[in-house]
Amino acid sequence: MNTQTDKRATEIIGYRGKKYEIDVPRRDICEAPNQDNKFHKQQMEYAISKQDWVTVENRITNGLRFMWLFELDENGMRIE
C-alpha cells in the first residue's frame, strides 16, 4: 500500500544484499513536504557514496522503527 498523498511511486534502495522500500506516511509528508520518498533515497545514496556506514545503519534502523522503510523479501514483498 502506497501512503503518499499524491500516490508517487515508492523508492527502492539496496544495502548489504538487502532491498528496502521507502514509503513515507502521508502525515509526515504533510508536516515536511520536501522530505518525500525521493528525498530519503537521495540521503541514503549520498551516505553510501561517502561510506558513512553509521548514518546508513541509523537511517535504516529509524526507518524500520518509524515505518517509513520496509525490508523486501526475494519476491519484492514487504517483510512487516
Image: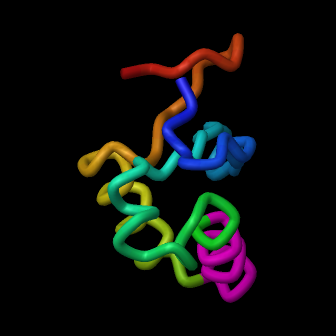
Q: How is the image coloured?
A: rainbow
Tell whether 18 sits left or right of 68: right
Number of dots carrying numbers:
0
Q: Residue furthest left?
A: 65
Return the x and y of residue 45 as percentages of the image width and height: 71, 72
Tell me if 54 is positioned left or right of 66 in this view.
right
Q: Residue 51 at what x, y percent from top left?
A: 64, 82
- Please identify the dominant SS of the magenta region: helix
Vertical placement of residue 62 versus 66, above or below? below
Give the quarter of the image for residue 38: bottom right
* Residue farthest bottom in this picture: 50
Is residue 10 shown above or below 73? below
User: Which residue is pictured at 47% across the width and 36% down the height?
Assistant: 70
Q: Is residue 62 above or below residue 56?
A: above
Q: Quadrant of the C terminus?
A: top left
In the rendered view, does 50 fall on the left or right side of 73?
right
Q: Residue at x 68, y 16 (%)?
A: 74
Q: Quadrant of residue 72?
A: top right
Find the magenta span and give its range.
Answer: 41-51
Near-viewer residue (23 or 27): 27
Where does residue 46 sit, x and y in percent of width and height?
A: 69, 82
28 is within the stretch colored magenta: no
